[in-house]
Structure formats: C-alpha cells, structure tokens
Amino acid sequence: MQNRITKILKRNGRVVNFDRQRITNAIFQAARQLEGEDLNRAEFLSDKVVERLNQLYSEVFPPSVEEIQDIVIAILREEGHSSTAEIYEHYREEQARKREKKAVRVITDDNIPYKILWEEYVWNVEHSCDTVEKINQLIRGNRFCWLVEEVEKLYSKRVAEAVNRILADPGKIRIIIVAGPSSSGKTTTTLRISKKLLEKGIRFKKIELDNYYKDLSDQPRDEFGDYDFETPEALDLELVNRHFDELLNGKTVQVPIFDFQKGVRKKQTVPFTLNPNEMLLLDSLHGLYDQLTANIDKGLKFKLYIETLNQIKDVNNNFIRWSDLRMLRRSIRDSWSRNYNPFETVGHWHYVRHSEMRHIVPFIGTVDYIFNGSLQYELPVLKKYLWKYYGDIAEHYKKTPRRFDAFIRAQRVHDLLDSIEAIEDDGCIPSDSLMREYIGGSSLEY
C-alpha cells in the first residue's frame, strides 16, 4: 500500500526514517511466541497499522515511537489478535524496564535523566506512594493531607537546590531561562525561584513570552481547522530577539499583551526595562529553542529544564506517562484560562507532543539544571476536577477515526482516573503550591 509516512520521532526527539518492516517484524515475533508462523498475516496487520498512521499523521506531523506502538496494539485487538497484543505489550514494557535500569547514570542518556528518576522512585517507595494502589490506601487511611505536606516539602527543597545552583556561579548571568513542556509547572516554579532569589538579594524581572504570540489570524490552520500554536514559530521571534537585545543594552521596550480569549494582541503595551544589576527571568515552553535567544551570548544564560518526572505505577504495573499527567493539568487550566474545554485540549494534544519532541526534548542535554515538577498527590486531585469528562471524551473520539490518537489517549487516561480514589476536599493544598496553578486558588500572582 502507498505510504506517506516517511519519518518518525524517536524518544530522544530525533527524527529518523520510517521503516515499515520493523512493524511487521515486531508483530511476527510476538505471534511466534504463540506458535504463529503466518508472515503474510503479520504483513497484512502492518498494512493496517500503516493505513491508520496515514489517517492520523503526515510528513509535517510524523508519529512518535510510542504512538506507533499504541496503534499496533489497537490494530491487533481490533483484528481479533488480543493474545498477540498482550505479548507485544509485554515486550514493550520489558524494554521500558530496561531503560529504567539505567537509573544509575548521571545527567541524561537519550535525553532522559535516569539518576533523577531513580531518586524520585526511591522517595516514592519510602513514602508509600509509588503505586496507584498505595496512594488509594493513603486516601482511605485519611493520610492524603500528610502526603500533600511531604510532597510540598520536597518541592520546596527542589526550589532551594535550583537557587543554589544559580548562585553558585553568578558571574555575568543576565537571563535565567525556565523551560519545559506544557503544564510541567514552569510558571509556579519560576515564581517560587524568583521569591528565593529576592530573599538572597538578587534583583530580577520576569517577562511573559506568552504575550509574544502572533495573532491567530497570522497562523495557518491544519486540515481539522486547528491552530498549531505549540510551535516556537507561533511566537514573534524577531520581536522577542530585538527586545532581548535592547533590554540587555539598557533600553526600554514595549511588551505586547496577548488576549487568549480572542486570540489577538491588544493595542495596549507595557513598558519594560532591565537595569544593569538585574536578571531577566524567562518562563517559556520553548526556552531551550536556540532561535528564541539567538542573539544572546551563552555565558549570559542559565537554563533550567522542568518536567513531571513522575515515577508512580498504575494498576497494570506500568509507570504512568508524564505527558498524560500534564494533559490532565492542562485540561483543567485551559477550561478556565483559555476558554478551551477538555474535549478540545485532548484533541489538540498531538500538536503539544510533537512540538515537545521536536523543539524541547532534543535540547535537554544542554541545560544547567533539571527540575522535577511532579507531585505525587496530584492524581486524586485531577480526578476530582476531570472525572466527569473523560468517559465522554473517549466515546467522542472513538467515533472520529481521523482522531484515533485522541481516543487512545483519552481512554488510557480514563482508565487511569477510574483506578484512583477521588478526594472531596483539596483545602490542605497550600496556596503557593504548583497544583494551584491548575486548579485555582493560588496566592501567587501569575
């Protein structure tokens, strides 16, 4: 069959050539464990996978390895090969566990900070929150608020460590960049770091790059009529660089104000000046993207990367996907801050993930510090706010073949939320918590 998928995104963010034969081989090897010897059937099934990939992706938005594997499992089950699907999924999990065993390595390998993952997992085990069932037990034992308190202490410790790293070599640093994927906690972490720096006598100013979005009318729509404003090119990069250059040279710039409800910049602007003894604090989804700060000397920048490096296992003994947690966080925040309902957030998520894999993940190895933005208590909180939506979201996208990727995500998240105990009262979550960035009630000024 004709295939227009020529590239795929690997886990480390690299774009490589698509090889259909690898899908056929994987299916055939899984079938052989059940004494299946029909190579023609494996080829037929891989054709089905490629057909589904052609419906969902393109050369502009190629599928990731994880997305291809999701579709292989779905096709196997649809075609009546549930046992083969289980074998394939088991192999996938084994490979994931092998990657986890690299945890003793320092910094990153394939752009994954295994050492931090290991430290996170050990902390979770010590605090009886390394699995969904253990978290359920804490809730049933009225220990949810205890877990919140312990996690918030851990988060505060991480903030302090980040500040110490910044101050360890202040030199000529003028810009602190806090970068990371969508809903990883950049904004709250930036504010908390800012507060600590101020306590240390470091003057700073924060600039919101979200205000530099181009008007939606200036951005192309895809075949679904949706905007890809997750790409760094959705920002007015020319204006961003000009403003940074002028700020570092002591000039005053007029920062735009973006109206997310209407999708346009307002006519008003805000004057902004950076004095010689001040640092510029930058919170951006695309802080690691070279063209964002192309005109600034590397020695002037300190790069901090934040991700939800969650190490909690679900009821099937699989580690919960970081991107699923972030999608849930964003589902809540989008509903009240950007006039997006959770259905739209799930449908739009493929843009988010592809942008992350292309413009964020490949550059993790270039950062000065990696910050873990996971909150071990957040699943019960997320269920409180989102459980009523995700069953309907899964059903909605199940009936939309060209959005089958959204169905897979929605169904996986629905099953995850179904397995966790909900909470009624989240009042013990501190007002300056990262969680408040998403559920509201924060004492921080965003």
Image (spheres, grey):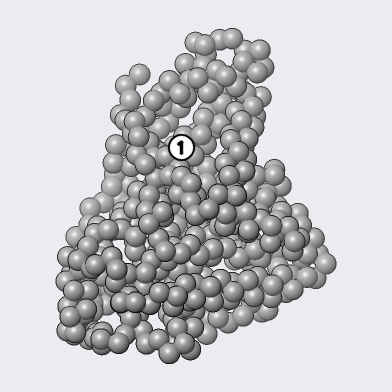
Q: Which structural element holds mark 1? A: helix
> Are there few (<14), some (14-19), or many (20+) residues within 10 Å of tag 1?
few
For residue 403, side relative to residue 99 (left or right): left
Which residue is disc 1 drawn over?
65
Image position of 211 with respect to 123: above or below? below
For residue 388, side relative to residue 239 (left or right): right
* Image quadrant where residue 169 sits: bottom left
Q: Amino acid at mark 1?
A: Val
Residue at left 71%, top 47%?
315
x, y percentage for residue 334? Answer: 45, 66
x, y percentage for residue 437? Answer: 50, 73
x, y percentage for residue 178? Answer: 40, 68
Total number of numbered discs in the rendering: 1
State whether residue 377 appears in this view: yes
State whether residue 135 appears in this view: no
x, y percentage for residue 17? Answer: 34, 30
Residue lying farthest to the right in this orientation: 141
